[in-house]
Amino acid sequence: MNTHKFDLPLVLPVAFLKFETKTQATITLEVVIPKQYSLSIQPGQYFMLWLPQIDEIPISVSNFEKNRLAFTICSKGYTSKQMMTMQKGDLLGLRGPFGKGFEIHPENVAIIVAGGMGITPLRYLIYNLLKIKTKQIILLQGAKTASELYFQEELKYLDIKTFFYTDDGSYGQKGFPTQKLLALLNNTQNHNELALYGCGPEIMLKQILEIAKTNHIQHQVQLSLADRYIRCGYGICGSCYLDDIGLSVCHDGPVFRGDILEQIKDFGNFGRKADGSKYKL
């Protein structure tokens, strides 16, 4: 069966919405893809979501099941703030899916490291890993505070091992998920069976890569740079280029292997603004 990619917006009504925080600053929206369209979506891929008469923004897929496509959105810029006011039945345009996602293999022990909103694409990854009966799944999820541990009530009841961390100690252990990652690797004899996945603040992703390099498994790491600025989705505008090997986050990523990221000087050091100029992370 041929799979579809929407280059022009497919406009659909919002079928479901739920606020993920009491402050109504994070929302999960679902749309139902019509049955005549067959979509194949890798965990880690994203869509450009268009709010008619306002703008479009890139948002990772947080789940896709039985033609119900879910996105979890945090109120950061003007367009995402407007999405916080949406109601069931409001229209939303979709272009995509775009980019390269996570590669998954059932024979691996999957260690997943999530920071803040980085859990969004990793949630969809977890459900895919469960479907293919992955050998073992370990989730290390961190956030600034308990209210930002998105989906933790849902995920802790799945057939996975979960460890939760908060900067302020308001839920789980006080600290960072990378501390547990370091301990897990130190206590694992066979590193060859491991697959590491991560998404979240780039400083955290840099730490994951450094820990992996210490254990000589950077080629077994896949990290999503979904937090970086993305505009066109085709690798043309240059807003998301990574120096110094010229890859674009929107087209060549947002998921990259660790042995690719270690060649990129920008990674963990510099981000890009909307105009393409760099800033220190």
Image (cartoon, helix red, strand yellow):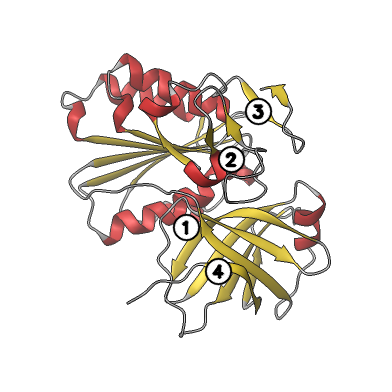
- Name the residue beneath numbered marker 1: 154
Spatial CA span between label 3 and label 2:
18 Å
Q: Secondary structure at mark 1?
A: helix
Amino acid type, mark 4: Phe
What number is the disc on residue 6?
Answer: 4
What number is the disc on residue 83?
Answer: none
Q: Earlier in the sequence, mark 3 or mark 2?
A: 2
Q: Position of residue 70 (x, y in %)?
A: 55, 65
Spatial CA span between label 4 and label 1:
30 Å
**Side (left or right) of 222 relative to 245:** left
Q: Residues within 10 Å of mark 3 (few under 14, many from 20)?
A: many
Q: Earlier in the sequence, mark 1 or mark 3?
A: 1
Q: Earlier in the sequence, mark 2 or mark 1?
A: 2
Q: How many marks?
A: 4
Q: Are marks 4 and 2 in contact (CB under 8 Å)?
A: no
Q: What residue do we see at 75% from left, 74% from top?
A: 87
Spatial CA span between label 2 and label 1:
16 Å
Q: Residues within 10 Å of mark 2 (few under 14, many from 20)?
A: some
What number is the disc on residue 116?
Answer: 2
Which mark is nearer the camera, 4 or 1? 4
